[in-house]
Amino acid sequence: MPDQTPVLEVKNLCKYYSVKRKGLLKAVDDVSFSIQKGETFGIVGESGCGKTTCGKTCIGMLAPSGGQVLFDGKSVHSMSKSERFDFTSRAQMIFQDPYASLDPHQKVYDIVAEGIRIHKMAAGRAEEERMVLELLDMVGLNAEHAMRNVHEFSGGQRQRIGIARALAVDPEFLFCDEPISALDVSIQAQIVNLLVRLQKDRQLTMLFIAHDLSMVKHISDRIGIMYLGKMVELAGADELYRRPLHPYAQALLAAAPIADPKASRERKKTILAGEVPSPLNPPAGCRFSSRCQYRTDRCSQQLPDLQEAEPGHFVACWLYENKR
């Protein structure tokens, strides 16, 4: 179970891009959340909502336009060279596309051993070999795979290699950027179950980003839902799926497939009007107001803050103003 020590604190994070002749694209706009030690925090949203940009900024791959990200109390974007080097061993990333993130002509052994060598984690070649083979076994690969080139492996196997590479430096924190979206459906559950097991065995703290709602619920302790660069709802995984509050979250969950045909037929459907607005020209008030069936004049004029509507359940919606 996660304790109450925040490993990662995200405070009013913004990431903007200037687009020639079109204005300012607010990919991430005033987003705040924290991730406790030993917790898996999931971020869900449709393509273009800013979830990957948020994650990459949190881990220091992108510089923020505003706000700050703290890892164990230290600013990720203001670290010294030595602090940054230490941070890269404590925080690692699993990439979305295992075909693009691994050199197809490099041997599996060298890919997994790279971090071990950079951070001088092995006393010699024999210890390095032992560590690499243990890591491969941990992710479901065999010792015979070590000396083969990456191009010989399937997508699921490549993602296992990517996970082994990330774990090679014994990190405390993993950023998983849609790690199953490029894989066959038959393989996705295997990779998620592997991550769940590794998180428990190694007591990892994880930021897990995806658009597959069922997978995010399976792996996450808490979930945040993003829409057009804003965090619109944040709650425990079970609570969010049991009782979503924000109209966008309700529509998102209503569209998720369920295995029971009878329950699927009886489930209330939520049809969203219109198209997702351009992030270059979002609505003046609530970003979701142009598609919301409950909107009022206030919704199109004033942007609601993310507030605690119920214990541990946060929502950015004027419908819940009187419940705060």
Image (cartoon, rainbow, N blue to C red):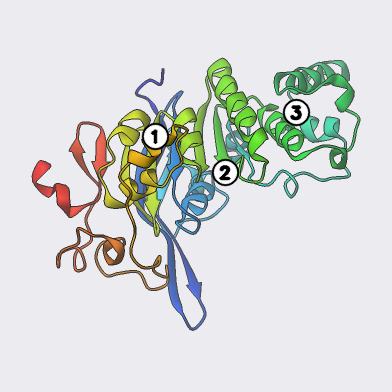
- Callout 2–callout 1 Cβ contact below 8 Å: no
- Callout 2–callout 3 Cβ contact below 8 Å: no
Q: Which mark identifies residue 177?
A: 2
Position of residue 233 measured from the top left corner of the image (x, y, whole percent): 31, 45
Q: Is residue 82 left or right of residue 123?
A: left
Within 10 angstroms of label 2, few (less than 14), some, or many (20 or more) residues?
A: many
Position of residue 67 measured from the top left corner of the image (x, y, whole percent): 38, 53
Precedes in sequence: disc 3 or disc 1: 3
- Callout 3–callout 1 Cβ contact below 8 Å: no
* Callout 1 secondary element: helix
Q: Is residue 21 above or below residue 304?
A: below
* Callout 3 secondary element: helix
The residue that disc 1 covers is: 262
Camera-nearest residue between 83 and 168: 168
Q: Which of marks 2 and 1 is in front?
A: 1
Q: Residue at x 25, y 41 (%)?
A: 314
Within 10 angstroms of label 1, few (less than 14), some, or many (20 or more) residues?
A: few
Amino acid type for the residue under numbered disc 2: Asp
Amino acid type for the residue under numbered disc 3: Ile
Residue lying furthest bottom: 21
Q: In this view, does 316 lie to the left or right of 134?
A: left
Camera-nearest residue between 58 and 123: 58
Precedes in sequence: disc 2 or disc 1: 2
The residue that disc 3 covers is: 116
Position of residue 290 measured from the top left corner of the image (x, y, whole percent): 29, 67
Q: How far apart are marks 3 and 1 (CA)?
A: 52 Å
Amino acid type for the residue under numbered disc 1: Lys
> Residue 10: in sight, yes or no?
no
Position of residue 316 measured from the top left corner of the image (x, y, whole percent): 25, 50
Q: Residue at x 20, y 40 (%)?
A: 308
Q: Distance between the residues labelled 2 and 1?
A: 34 Å
Q: Residue at x 48, y 72 (%)?
A: 18
